[in-house]
Image (cartoon, helix red, strand yellow):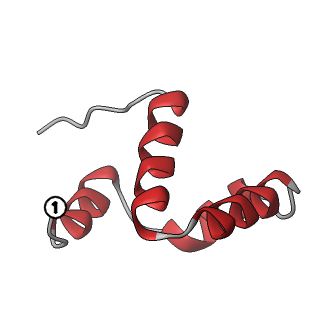
Amino acid sequence: MSATVETEQELTEEALAILRQHLPPHKVARLLSVWQIGKGDYTQDRDRLFTGDSVNSLFEEAAKYPSK
């Protein structure tokens, strides 16, 4: 099994499309402004959240959720 990794731009576009489908525009704008602040350290959060996980285990976990 192999995983395809999209570019950051592709990921951003997909995430924004999902947000626009499920949130009103003012909430999308508010969320984007919060994300732009740059608080926190993603690498520390990633290590804390995914310690002990592999790409395969994360893929299997994600596969449990229905896709559209």
Q: Residue at x 87, y 62 (%)?
A: 39
| Residue 34 pos. (x, y %) | 80, 64
Q: Nearer the viewer, residue 50 or 68?
A: 68
Q: Residue at x 55, y 72 (%)?
A: 49
Vertical relation: 14 (above or below) 54: above
Name the element at disc 1: loop
| Residue 53 pos. (x, y %) | 39, 64
Q: Residue at x 11, y 39 (%)?
A: 1
Q: Nearer the viewer, residue 62 or 30?
A: 30
- Looking at this rendering, what residue extends furthest in the front direction? 25
Horizontally, residue 34 falls left or right of residue 26, namely right
* Label 1: few (<14), some (14–19) or many (≥20) C-alpha neighbours in 10 Å: few
| Residue 30 pos. (x, y %) | 75, 66
Horizontally, residue 43 falls left or right of residue 41, namely left
Q: Residue at x 48, y 38 (%)?
A: 13
Residue identifier under label 1: 67
| Figure quadrant of residue 22 | bottom left
Horizontally, residue 58 falls left or right of residue 30, namely left
| Figure quadrant of residue 45 | bottom right
How many numbered marks have been drawn onto this rendered protein structure? 1
Q: Amino acid at mark 1?
A: Ser
Vertical relation: 16 (above or below) 10: below
Q: Quick one: quadrant of the C terminus?
A: bottom left
Q: Nearer the viewer, residue 39 or 24?
A: 24
Horizontally, residue 1 falls left or right of residue 9, namely left
